[in-house]
Image (spheres, grey):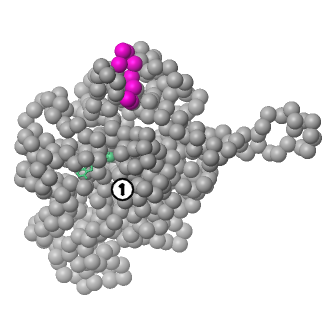
Amino acid sequence: MIRRFLQWLSGSKETAANADASVRKEAPHSSASGHPIPPAEPADQSKLDRAPPQRAPVDLQIGLDVGTSCTKAVLGDAELGDQVAIPINGGNTLPGFLLPTQIFEDDGAFSLDEKSGSIRRRNLKIRVLRASETRMELEKADLHELTAFVALVLRRILSWAGGELARRHPNRTPVWYLNVGIPSKGGTADQFEPTYRRIIGAAVHLVPGDAPITREGISAALARSETESRWMPHARIHTFPEAGAQLASIMFSPYKPEGCLLVVDVGAGTLDVSTMRVRADQTAARCVLHCCTVSHLGAHFLDLARRDGWPIDEDFENMLDALPNDDGVTPTARDGHTRAPDSFAEDCRGVLLPTVHRYRMRLREAHLNAGYRPWTNGLPFVLSGGGQRDPFYQDLLQSRLPEWLSTTVSEWHEAVSHGPRPGLRRQAFPLPPRFGPQALSENFDRFSVAHGLSLGVDGLMEFRESQ
Ligand SMILES: Nc1ncnc2c1ncn2[C@@H]1O[C@H](COP(=O)(O)OP(=O)(O)OP(=O)(O)O)[C@@H](O)[C@H]1O
Ligand SMILES: [Mg+2]
């Protein structure tokens, strides 16, 4: 089922595609391991005294969102029915949960912490992504660095989880699942997904123990990436499109808006635009995912455009060097205003307008049906991702897009009886009721991809083609 969703996503790159996602509401709260809980021993006291303590398994999901600028992780605990952000950057306020996606190399070993004399490597994700998009050969160094990063992040997660588990599930044995977001639509045409799976497959081999992670060790792990690791077999590793994970996060919120929704995620690297439709039926919440586009128009590119103009007339390496040093929290924009070259806004228009237009066309029939109105008072939209805090993107959605729609898309204002009111209506990003810690509530949108992943890909959704 997941494969079909991925295929659908990749198929929808150029043309609008349509898929029905039936979402089992109870899924995140049910155990998915299939591990039998050992039956109680017979009441033979001498036998009980000799027997090792029973440690029943407990399923735990790691939702890992490796971002262009910073990485987020959420632990999904289906048994307790909650999801908690993991302080992978060591603190209990927002920056403590946002780990810059960078690594330090010191004396042949990799670390997430800077030491004097260590060499910093940045842009780990974008390098690997670019190589797969352009079908260039991936530099061994880039492959090594992202592998080391994922391995070290997983070590951090597990070391944090030790204490957390003792509190949550004393005397239980964790059965880990790993769900990682991919910055594209996945599917057979996706070049990044197989590379990323190889990286993750190698990284899980490097996790156990605390031996230094070196290039030799990474080479050996990459050679073994096809073989199973004991603590994290392949069957428990999933990759899932970031945009899809975010929609899953919204779908499970009791505050999800019913009807149509435009979701715009502004990351450091990509601008992801997706549209969905949520309606209730008797057995399940049904969500029709219409269109999804992923483009390199995120906050880092806006920053470059503001500085050097757009499009960028630089080779890739120079461009990477020019990307801002970003802690993921402090705005990097130079002028702090909405201004950006018109050509950058035009490129955003080229992504947003056709997506929304296609969506509107698909829903036209529904609008014409007096009994069903997908939206009545402007198309609702949510903005997410760190980059949406930049005034440029807010202005893009709140002023420019409505204007483009009204001037360019003639039927947008077309009067139909019971028709939708034109324009767009911003909604708050729905906050799931069992997401913690509470200190992150205001910034939940930053964690929505990792949150969706932490719900557990397997039990979460069944996708099927719609007519
Ligand atoms: N208050 C703010 N004002 C402007 N920009 C901000 C603010 N806070 C964060 N950002 C920007 O948000 C970006 C990070 O957002 P996010 O964590 O969603 O991206 P990412 O997941 O790393 O990237 P991607 O999803 O593209 O891989 C950074 O470029 C950061 O500079
Ligand atoms: Mg992101």
Residue reaching furthest bottom?
417
Residue 350 shows up from this direction: no
Residue 415, image quadrant: bottom left
Q: Disc count in the image?
A: 1
Report the side of 461 relative to 193 (left or right): right
Residue 88, image quadrant: top left
Q: Nearer the viewer, residue 423 or 2?
A: 423
Question: Amino acid under label 1?
Answer: Asn
How packed is label 1: few (under 14 Cα within 10 Å), some, or many (20 or more)?
some
**444 lies above or below 239:** below
Report the side of 81 relative to 354 (left or right): right
Q: Residue at x 93, y 36 (%)?
A: 46
Q: Residue at x 43, y 40 (%)?
A: 90
Image coords of residue 21 (percent x, y): 44, 59
Q: Quadrant of the C terminus?
A: bottom left
Report the side of 118 relative to 205 (left or right): left
Residue 104 shows up from this direction: yes
Residue reaching furthest front?
116
**391 lies above or below 169:** below
Image coords of residue 201 (percent x, y): 46, 29
**246 lies above or below 51:** below
The reply to whether the magenta stretch includes residue 39 is no
Q: Secondary structure at mark 1?
A: helix
Query: What residue range appears in magenta?
Result: 106-113
Image coords of residue 79 (percent x, y): 62, 53
- The residue indicated by pointer 1 is 443
Image coords of residue 230 (percent x, y): 59, 28
Q: Residue at x 17, y 28 (%)?
A: 317
Q: Residue at x 33, y 77 (%)?
A: 373
Q: Nearer the viewer, residue 42 or 132?
A: 42
CB at disc 1 and ligand 1 closer than 8 Å: no
